[in-house]
Image (tube, rainbow, N blue to C red):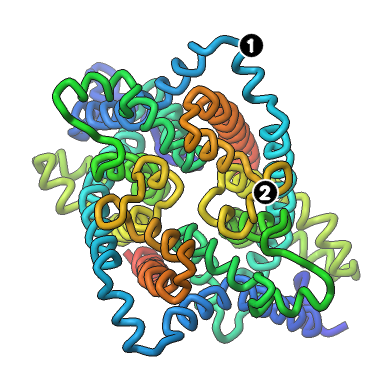
Amino acid sequence: MSSKHHRVGDGPLIRRTLIGLAVVLTVLFLFMPLVVIFTQAFAQGWAGYIGNILDEYTLHAIGLTLFVALLTVPLNTVFGVFLAWLVTRFSFPGRRLLISLIDIPFAVSPVVAGLLYLLLYGSNGWAGQWLGQYDVELMFAWPGIVMVTVFVTCPFVARELIPLMQQQGRDEEEAAVVLGASGWQLFRRVTLPNIRWALLYGVILTNARAVGEFGAVSVVSGSIRGETNTLPLHVELLYQDHNIVGAFTAASLLAGIALITLAVKTIAEWRQSRV
Amino acid sequence: MADTNPSARPRRPGVPVSRRVLPGFGLSLGITLFFISLVLLLPISGLVIHTAGMGWEQFWFVVTDPRVVASYKVTVLAALAASLFNCVFGLLMAWVLVRYEFPGKRLLDAIMDLPFALPTAVAGITLATLFAESGWYGRVLSEFGIEVAYTPLGIVVAMAFTSVPFVVRTVQPVLEELPAEDEEAAVSLGASDWTVFRRILFPVLWPALVTGGGLSFARSLGEYGAVVFIAGNSPYVSEVISLMVFVRLEEYDFAAASAIASVVMGVSLLLLLAINVWQGRYLKRLHGGRG
């Protein structure tokens, strides 16, 4: 009837209905949980909030979580960049298999991931027994937490970079090589400027998942308060102690990191589209 | 992903083709293989060896234990329900985000990824609080006699929440690239919106919908952190598979834990393979054989 009605769903009624439905569902399903986290965390006011954060065990959990992220994120960033470089710049047999292998941590349940490491490096595992001879205990200690976190978060940087680097192609880099650039110069001057926003998002997403990993870490950590308790495990402990405000205080820190991650993603996508 | 790399470039006769102009092949291959072997393959082969060592009868006894079988059913049914919900919700969100302009759209788009960025334990306690009988949603729902928290329905909610982005993010790019011609022609010939959607749009969209739904299903099968807080975890009723692995571990029954874990991992890897093959095939069709 109206001449503006060109494509499906352009009618004003259906348009308004769908937008309204989408907004309402998103508010109910995704936005309200955020509201709950912060309302519960501030249920005792600012003073209570600060007091809960300054709790000895909460501070220790924050410290351990940051420490784990500090080791995990650089390791997985380096790996992700090398993997993306390998599979987008060279063709070789097994390339597709390699790209599929890297998705395994996405598909494997975090509890199973934790179990994999416990079986191998635990006191019954062959690697664990071998290391035990030298009094090295990896499980139920921070190295175990770092190892499973590396496993769970290793795909993120590569997954962000591979589609982008594939799309950009290798012409610019080949030109640089012909002009005599060294490998490092090539990466720093040509590749990095082209991928930096996607790389930034990959890194920040790796960080968000590293600080938030729960299932795998709870298998190998032992959750010893003040020793091997990361922030997500601390959330669980406080929640089970019926210290709801304390649990949501710790949760609000993690939610804050999640919100920063989303903000960086939005900015990075916008900037990357202009590179 | 579409392979746009021109790997077969024209060769000049007589010149020895150095296919690898770019540096770093050996280094990046070495680092990648070392990392993947150490971080992924070694632990996985450990599980396989461990499970293979326990003998078929014991394995079968452990993985067909009635309580474990009940947890398979709960997990698979809940994951199915959650991914069906996400197919509908994800399609709606992708459609609205691609087709319409409205204030707050950027924010809506950004918050779609919240479930990936928010730790699962945080999602778990938050959903449990919202849906508990005293919670904001629980209070309303209990008026209608619906209980979500500490029931299998709670598991569905937790799984649906943690896998929201999959369908949205797989359907969105397909909708963006959709050519307008067929659709406009059909609309101008007087076909109703529903007919055009069903006959012209849906046939292009459904492969992406299946991929997104499959990813959502695979993720839901293994979900643990968000689920355990809201499920209630009563044996035979609301225990998920990941929790069963955990329960066996806490009983120090490593053999049973690894047997169940190997079933879970086998299913996840098969699903991953199926999704990869499926995606490769339909992408190839979509990009005219270049996939």
Q: Residues within 10 Å of mark 2 (few under 14, many from 20)?
A: few
First reached walking from the N terminus: tag 2 or tag 1:
1
Q: Is residue B171 left or right of residue B182?
A: left
Residue identifier under label 1: B57
CB under 8 Å between discs 2 and 1: no
Closer to us: A236 or B97: A236
Image quadrant where residue A171 sits? top left
Q: Residue at x 35, y 45 (%)?
A: A222
Residue type, mark 2 in image = Ser
Q: Is residue A124 left or right of residue B218?
A: left
Indicate the position of residue A153 as horizontal and vertical percent values: 37, 46
Image quadrant where residue B126 sits? bottom right
Indicate the position of residue B8 as horizontal and vertical percent values: 40, 28
User: Which quadrant of the figure contains the N terminus of chain A?
Assistant: bottom right
Closer to us: A240 or A78: A240
Numbered disc 2: secondary structure: loop
Indicate the position of residue B67 as horizontal and vertical percent values: 69, 35
Indicate the position of residue B182 as horizontal and vertical percent values: 77, 59
Residue type, mark 1 in image = Glu
Residue identifier under label 2: B234
Q: State whether residue A175 appears in this view.
A: yes
Q: CA distance from mark 2 to mark 1?
A: 27 Å
